[in-house]
Image (cartoon, helix red, strand yellow):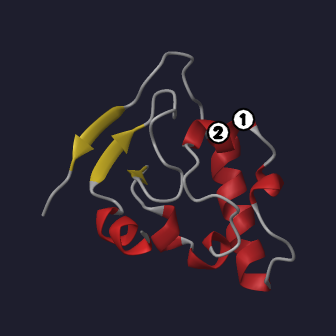
Amino acid sequence: MAAASSWTTGIAKCDLVSGTSVLYWDDLWNGRVRSVSHTHICAHVFDRNESVAVIFAKLFEDCFKLPLTYDSYGEFLELREELDALTLSGQFGDNLELHLE
């Protein structure tokens, strides 16, 4: 199943509204796919299939297996800052655009 996941990573560009239908790690939102741009911290996540809304609603620290490496911790701080600046709407759904090349 991991092989199927890797070839579908980032094929949909997402504009966040509520974050309920956008995968935090494997969808393209705000210009990047976090599993690709933040490989160190991604190796420590408990569940790569959580939506942006789910991760936004809980303590970011609770998403990871500890201990973190030095590089992972640097990426953690960067992503937590990004989440702190994120605003999600209470309305349901997101804008998804299929991005095939």
Left or right of residue 71: residue 32:
left
Which quadrant would residue 44 be assigned to in this image?
A: bottom right
Q: In the image, 55: left or right of 15? A: right
Name the residue at 63% across, 51% down. 82
Q: CA distance from mark 2 to mark 1?
A: 5 Å
How dense is the environment of label 2, judged by Cα within 10 Å: few (below 14), some, or many (20 and up)? some
- Is 57 or 5 nearer to us in this picture? 5
- Vertical arrangement, residue 82 with respect to residue 32, above or below: above
Residue reaching furthest left?
Answer: 101
**Residue 67, position as x, y percentages in the image:** 87, 77
Going by the picture, which residue comes out furthest to the bottom?
70
- Kindly identify which residue carries mark 2: 54
- Badge 2 marks a residue whose secondary structure is helix
Q: Nearer the viewer, residue 4 or 38?
A: 4
Residue 61 falls in which quadrant of the image? Answer: bottom right
Q: Residue furthest top?
A: 91
Query: Mark 1 = which residue?
Result: 57
Proximity of marks 2 and 1: CB atoms separated by less than 8 Å = yes
Q: Position of residue 4 (x, y in %)?
A: 34, 68
Which quarter of the image is occupied by the N terminus?
bottom left
The residue depicted at 20 percent of the width and 53 percent of the height is 99
- Looking at the image, residue 90 sits to the left or right of residue 65; the answer is left
Residue most toward the right? 67
Q: Which mark is residue 15?
A: none
Q: Residue at x 45, y 42 (%)?
A: 22
Q: Is residue 30 above or below residue 54?
A: below
- Amino acid type, residue under disc 1 in the picture: Ala
